[in-house]
Every structure is written in structure tokens, then in C-alpha cells.
Image (cartoon, rainbow, N blue to C red):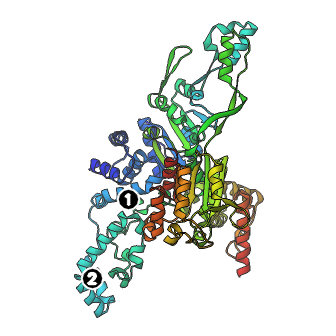
Amino acid sequence: MFPTFFLALREAKLPVSLKEYLALMEAMRAGLAEYSLDHFYFLSRACLVKDERNLDKFDRVFGQCFQGIESVEQGIEAEIPAEWLRALGERLLSEEEKRKIQALGGWDKLMETLKKRLEEQKERHSGGSKWIGTAGTSPFGAYGYNPEGVRIGQDGSRHRRAVKVWDKREFRNFDDTVELGTRNIKVALRRLRRWARQGAATELDLPGTIASTARNAGTLDLRLVPERRNTVRVLLFLDVGGSMDDHIRVCDELFSAARSEFKHLEHFYFHNCPYEGVWRNNARRDDRVDTWSVIHTYPADYKLVFVGDASMSPYEIFEPGGAVEHWNDEAGAAWMERLLSAFPHAVWLNPLPEDAWAYTASVEMINRLMAGRMFPLTLAGLDAATAELGR
Amino acid sequence: MIMSFQGTETYVATEDLRVAVNAAVALERPLLVKGEPGTGKTVLAHEVAKALGRPLIPWHIKSTTKAQQGLYEYDAVSRLRDSQLGDARVHDIANYIIRGKLWEAFEADAAPVLLIDEIDKADIEFPNDLLLELDRMEFYVYETRQTIKARQRPIVIITSNNEKELPDAFLRRCFFHYIRFPDRDTMQKIVDVHFPKLRHDLVHEALRVFYQLREVPGLKKRPSTSELLDWLKLLMVEDLPVEALRAKDGKTVIPPLYGALLKNEQDVHLFERLAFMARRDR
């Protein structure tokens, strides 16, 4: 049973290793779990999970693996017989509705499906309560069966006890697919740091001074070194206006985090797709900068970061004259390619959730232009993007 | 049998925290504690030491702290000075070895509680540099060619504010506990433990205002347990009546002495604006 649990955790992509598993076994042998499931849950959580972002995943796997254990532990308790539920259903439903239920394979079948769907939903994290709540065509929404009222599976309290700790999934917010705040972004951007000592020697080099003094037979010999600086340099291209208005907050946060994290940060604004000109500030009026001059001004070791939802008409990317605001002689794709060949380290951060990308053709096109280097603007996406830029 | 930690008169430990602490103590592994600022991570070490009757050795980490400083430092500068003054001490290098907190913990008579506070403040390599020392509880002093071994393995409690990711190899050696923000019942217990004489209705109102404040959307720093306790202390000193906390005109009345709860200028500003809007809408 425990190896199954361990393997299930690995399958759910939790970074658990043998060492941690052995620690758990050791703790079990020391009798720390006191033969209670709750204690075993706390103990295995302390042993196996090392990051609050994984706690939610852990809770889900734990719930799946140890479902049903609780009832063994408690012995037999009164369960609500299925007949009662059926009777209740029959009292509340009209004839026509009952016929529909029959058509779906009868009450038992319906309950079976509901249960299955509930489980599916559980595994599929994103679904939440939406699945059953809003699906107009689903038999469950239509009749207003509250799945909680039916109390199926592990979600409800069949035993009239409180919901299990792991079923509460209180750590959902720490899952790293959630959106982020300035502080998290800063931590993620820190990955990009490259320390180097360059420029004038202004700091006292204590170890160097001591070593050379010792070599000098005790006569003081001062040594200086240049200050340590973060040498990473970033060009930030921000999409503004139009569909980006929905993402102002997260872009703001990204920008302010990047601002304080990188000393060498140049930022430009564009609309939908970069063309022959970009703007210095987001009013986009009289401060236009030629894209050519951007390409020529900054050396190739600048990291290029686009932030945009890449949602536009395909013409805006591939046709001359396709831009929405002005006449462009060359297609957006040509300018993208020029920028990308000038700055080989580049990523595109997209505030749209990753599973929505497929619905907009232009997102796929931009992603192809970026050679697959498009990342969602989430903590995990930002991590992956900084790893890509750091290569 | 090792005494187990059950919380103290001044510290309310939830069940999961108790299990984690006792597992770390029994298996002699470091316990890594994370959580929102002000939920009692550092205090935990103090309370564990108190409950188990062990001495506490705190090691507060700063951005400039090096792992080596926790073991020992060789004070070359004073040796240099002594040599130029002709001091006799200069001949024994051991005179210039300054013991770090880890050494102190290893040499203690009774196994102490070693608190490594805010480990994420240090350089990214810091935890890696301590791997072996925390695992085997020994290290080697090159200058004097001696190995320092722990007499008893100290209880190690490490806190982190999540400013940096900790390396996997390090995490694997620790137990981990995330202190969740306490729910209302736990919070009530915490307040009772700290202010047993506080009037019940005042606490009730204060908690209501506090949780309401935490739910205000867009706050940069939401107030946490330590801020609540400070605020209650202030309320007690000022001897405010319960009515002062009750909303007379609108849902979000500005609580008295809110400076103890909101530590950020923008938050105060945001809150005032919301309160103003709530009043206007009535």
C-alpha cells in the first residue's frame, strides 16, 4: 500500500525521492503516526512535501490513495440507503424528468456517471465546481441535483463527519499554476542574475589583502576589486491596448518587478505585433523609436522579452499593410524575425492561460515564429522562461 | 523516551504542526518551517526550546551571511595586528579561531535547539554549503586540523520566507511544515493565550474587523497574527469600548489604531478610499 502511494505521488509529478520515503518509513517504525489516519496524513506531508506549491497535489493524491480507509477505521456506521435517495428523487421529480432519467440508464446508472464525473473532475484540477454546475446539457445541472446534496464519493460527509483535511484542499492557492504577485515575479526573475565584477576597483578585497600581506612578510598591502554587479540586460517589449486591457494588473506587476530587479532594462511598447516602430511610453504618441535603431543600439547579449496575448488577426502578422493602426510596408513576421535574429535569447510571455492558446490562430503563429518559446505568465511559466533565457 | 511537543501556555500549535515537530525531534532531522510573515515561525523555535527544556541557539541569517560563519571564522586581521605588536598569543592559531553558532550547538552539554532564522535571506548557495554539516553533524577545522563532532544532535529549526528557492538536496534532508494562516477558532485560542483577561466581546469584534480587513481585495500586505496581537495590545492600552469597533455607518469602517494592522502607505490609502466609497453608497 505504501509503495503504491509513493508511486502515485511520483506519477503526479511530485518531486519525492527514495530518501524521503525511507524517512517516512523510519518515522512510522518509530510509532510517530500513532495509528491514526489524520496523524499519518500530517506525518507523510511533513516527510514528503517540501514546497507549499505541491501541497495541493499531495492532498489530491492522498485522497485518491487512501479513500475508503476511514470507514474501515471507524467500523460500520449508518449509511444512507440508496432507496431513501431514490424515494426522495421520485418525490421531487416530475414524470417527464423521471423518464429522462430512465433514458439515461436509470437512477443507478445516473449516480454511477455522476460519481465518475466527480472523480474525473477531481483529477482534472481545473474543473472545480463549474463542470457540474454550469454545463447546461449535463443531466446533473439540469435537474438541480446538488452533487453535495447527493453526497457521493469522498467529497461529502457520508459519515456526517467534517470533511477530511486533505479533501479541504486548503493549499490550492499555492499551486504554481496560479497567477502571481510582484514579489513572486521578482523571485522568479532572480534566476536570471549573472554576477560579475566589472569596472573600476572600488571595494576592499579582504582575502586578497590578507593573502598578499602575508606574502609581503606582514607589511600591509591593500588590494581592491570592482563591485559585484548583476550584468544581465533585458529588452522588454510590452503589448498595450485592445485585448491587453484585461491583463493590465499582471503586466504592471511584471514590469515593476523587472524594473527593480534589472539595472539594465530597456522597455518599449507595441500594439499586437511589433512593426517598423515601437514606442517609449504607453501613450504611443510622439516618442516613436525605429525598430531598426533598437536592433542596432543594443548588443546581442540583451535578453528579449515580449509580453503580449498574441491575439490578433493573422493578417497583422503575415501581410504588409495588415496592422490595425497604420500602413506597414513590411509584415509583422518580418520584423519579428529581424528582432529574433538580432537577439537570440528571447521569450514571449503570454498572460492568457495556456489551454486557451489553441483557440486563437495567431497565438499559434506567434509561438511558431518564436520557435516554441512562448510561456504563460504564471509562476511556472516564468520559471521556464527564465531557464530558457539563461541558456 | 523523548518528551513530545504539545504547544505551550503562550503558543498554540495545531495538530499538524505538533506532528511535524515531534517527527523532526524523534528522527533528529532539521525542520523547515515556512508561512506568511507573522504567523509565528521564529517564535516556534523559542517555544519548542521552552517546552522541551533545551537551550536555544539562534542564528539569524542576513544577505551577507556565509555558511562558514556558522562553523567558525579565522580572524586573520587580529592575528596580523598581534604579530606586529609582538603578542605571545600569535603562535597558537587556535586563539584566532572564532566559533560559530553551529560549533556552539555541537559542543553544548545538553542537545540545544538551533534556530536558523530566515535561511532564504542568504546567498543561493548557502543551504548547499551546510548540507554535510547538518546531515552528519560534524565538520573539519583546517587551521587546527581537528574534527568537531556533535555530542548530541541538536534540534534544528529552519525558517524561510520564500525569497529564494531552496536546493532539492537540502530539502530532501528536512521535514517541512507550512504554517497556514489560522482560522477563526485557532485565532481565538491564540488571542486567549496571549490576553487571557481581554473581554470576550471585544475579542469577538476585533476578530471580525480583522478578518474583514484581511479580505479587502488588493492589499499589498495583509495583516497577520503578530499584527493582530499588537493591535489588541494597543486596544487594551487605550481601553477602547467595544462600540468603537462596531460599524455604525457602512460595511468597512476604518478601525481605530489601524496603523498597527496596515503597514503600507498604499494599503492605508486603498482602505480609506474603500471606506469612503462604502459610506457614500449608503
Residue identified by numbered label 1: A60
Query: Which quadrant holds residue A328?
Result: bottom right
The amino acid at mark 1 is Arg
For mark 2, name the chain: A
Q: Position of residue B88 (x, y in %)?
A: 69, 6
> Foreground residue, A295 or B210?
A295
Give the farthest residue toward the right: B238
Q: Element under label 2?
A: helix
Q: Element under label 1?
A: helix
Q: Position of residue A274 (x, y in %)?
A: 58, 62
Q: Position of residue B225 (x, y in %)?
A: 61, 55
Q: Position of residue A198 (x, y in %)?
A: 66, 34
The mark tally for this picture is 2
> Foreground residue, B122 or A306?
A306
Quick check: can you spot residue A16?
Answer: yes
Q: Say which quadrant the C terminus of chain B sits in.
A: bottom right
The amino acid at mark 2 is Arg
Q: Please determine if labels 1 and 2 lie on a single subunit.
A: yes
Q: Say which quadrant the N terminus of chain B sits in.
A: top left
Query: Which quadrant holds residue A200?
Result: top right
Quick check: can you spot residue B222?
Answer: no
Q: Is residue A186 above or below residue A216?
A: below
In this picture, residue A258 sits left or right of residue B105: right
Q: Is residue B80 above or below residue A300?
A: above
Residue at 74 percent across and 68 percent down: it is B272
Residue identified by numbered label 2: A86
For mark 1, name the chain: A
Separation of residues labelled 1 and 2 (CA atoms)? 30 Å
> Foreground residue, A51 or B251?
A51
**Mark closer to the observer (1, 2):** 1
Residue at 50 percent across and 31 percent down: it is B154
